[in-house]
Amino acid sequence: MYRVVAIIILAIQVSLSCMSQENIWKGIAGKKRVYLTPYIVPGKENMAVIVCPGGSYFWLDYETEGHEVAKWLQSEGISAFVLEYRTALVPAFIFHHRLLFRGNRYPDPQNDLRQALRYIRANSEKFGIDTERIGMMGFSAGGHLVMSAVELFDRADWPSFVVPVYPVVTMTEPCVHERSRRGLLGEAEIGDTSRCDKLSLERHVPEDCPPVFLVNCKDDPIVDYRNSVLLDSALTAAKVPHCYLQYETGGHGFGASAVKGSEECRQWKEKFIQWLGEQYGKFR
């Protein structure tokens, strides 16, 4: 009971925090609850990153994994766009009503991300964005979302680089994050082996995948750290240029926070900026 109350309170808090943001893009194909919030760097032909918060495909951590991340990227000279993609929402977590009604589920989040990338590219001159340098960064379930972009989208809709941070990767045993699987698939399709296979990222890495920067911690109490090990192995097998940082401590949900996680894992931000510079040279 206490867990349910805590989740409801969290959902109210993040909803209120999002309401205060100025969103440039509301709705997609007539759907509600899809927003894109910009953090633009002045100038022209800047690098950009679409930020996808986590939340098990049921809700979103707007602050730590969304707006805090965007503000940090902006401070580094990188324009950022926080995507509030469609999730199943808290009532679906509590009542399992998607057994009777479709609700939000796959491929809704993927469609939202695809449309966000297209929107930014179509308005790149307005935002001062270089269309050849637009990446995607996601946390937890958001990490699964951004990596799925290069496995499920047509090449024309691929980002320039992908940054999954403590990501959900697999939809199969033994290290599946069951809540994210239920959030993405819905109760009726959890047992669909073909769908679970399709959405298990370690099984479908394309050989021409864009560069990947992968981060997680071995003491992660939420998403089994072996998810990232599976993805790292798949990227290596496909000879995809990538960097994998595995920290001993830090847990889960630290995002771009200056206080959450551990001193060790918070190094990922500096390492990412260094890696990005190696990929693209000067970008500030």
Image (tube, rainbow, N blue to C red):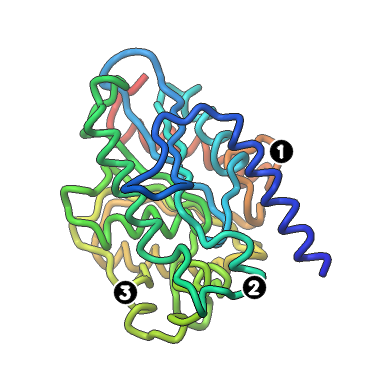
> Tag 2, which secondary structure?
helix
Q: Where residue 158 appears, x then y in whole percent?
A: 24, 49
Q: Which residue is mark 1?
A: 259
Instruction: Kindly identify the amino acid type of the residue bearing the numbered disc 3.
Output: Lys
CA separation, marks 1 and 2?
Answer: 34 Å
- Position in image of residue 279 (x %, y %): 29, 36
Residue type at tag 2: Phe
List x then y, in percent, for residue 89: 57, 59
CA neighbours of label 1 inside 10 A, class few (<14), some (14 to 19), many (20+): few
Compared across the picture, whether 18 is left or right of 144 comes to right
Q: How many marks?
A: 3
What residue sits right under mark 2 in the picture?
95
Which residue: 28% across, 20% down? Answer: 126
Where does residue 77 sit, x and y in percent of width and height? Answer: 42, 21
Task: Report the residue at 32% width, 83% height from top.
Answer: 194
Amino acid carrying label 1: it is: Val
Depicted 128 relative to depicted 270: above or below: above
User: Label 3, label 1: how many angstroms apart (C-alpha)?
Assistant: 37 Å
Q: Quadrant of the N terminus?
A: bottom right
Q: Secondary structure at mark 1?
A: loop
Give the camera-side residue of 46 and 25: 25
Nearer to me, 96 or 227: 96
Q: State the mark number for residue 198.
A: 3
